[in-house]
């Protein structure tokens, strides 16, 4: 069987792609003015891990190019949401940390998107979501191995 022509595989990836597109559009509409989903994702990650990360580490984590991450970080720095400092031991490398303004912006974004998440959980039910998560995590891990 040729997997590339498998209607099941095509349906799976089509549904995932459409759900991703719709989720991003919905989140973009409710995020605070000027904040993009990519900005929120980086701020959310930095808030959860604490400490500093390099742009290269963030690019790998989010599966984007270093250039794309540099662009996102430049916008976050211009907004005052992150601090970017040079590595004192290696001038070619930089470190990124969330700022107090970034923490506040992330908290505001979480408040703005919470109703969207609540609506989804209410409509689908927590049990369905819990049941879907292991499959989605396994799929993500498989796709990460291949990238």
Image (cartoon, grey):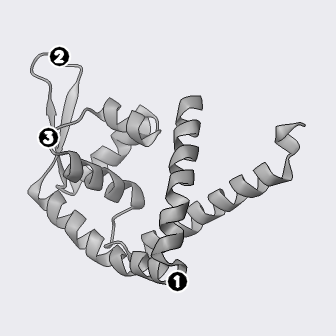
The image shows residue 67 at horizontal and vertical percentages of 42, 35
Q: Quadrant of residue 102?
A: bottom left
Q: Which residue is mark 2?
A: 90
Helix, strand or loop for disc 3:
loop
* Residue hosting label 1: 123
Q: Using the image, determine if residue 90 lies above or below residue 21.
A: above
Residue at 40% over, 80% down: 118
Q: Secondary structure at mark 2?
A: loop
Q: CA distance from mark 2 to mark 1?
A: 51 Å
Q: Earlier in the sequence, mark 2 or mark 1?
A: 2
**Total residue callouts:** 3
Query: Could you say where residue 13 lies in the image, as x and y percent from the top left?
Result: 70, 53
On the rendered structure, is 45 left or right of 135? left
Which residue occupies 83% across, 40% down?
A: 4
Provide the residue designation for mark 3.
Answer: 51
Q: Mark on residue 85?
A: none
């Amino acid at each position: 069987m040729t997997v590339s022509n498998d209607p099941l595989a095509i349906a799976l990836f089509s549904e995932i792609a459409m759900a991703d597109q719709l989720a991003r559009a919905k989140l973009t509409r409710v995020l605070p003015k000027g904040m993009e989903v990519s900005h929120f994702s980086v701020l959310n990650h930095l808030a959860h891990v604490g400490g500093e990360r390099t742009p290269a580490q963030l690019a790998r984590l989010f599966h984007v190019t270093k250039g794309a991450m540099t662009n996102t970080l430049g916008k976050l720095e211009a907004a005052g949401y992150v601090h970017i400092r040079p590595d004192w031991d290696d001038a070619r490398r930089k470190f990124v940390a969330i700022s107090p303004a970034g923490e506040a912006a992330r908290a505001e974004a979480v408040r703005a998107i919470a109703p969207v998440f609540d609506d989804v959980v209410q409509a689908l039910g927590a049990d369905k979501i819990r049941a879907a998560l292991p499959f989605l995590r396994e799929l993500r891990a498989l796709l990460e191995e291949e990238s």
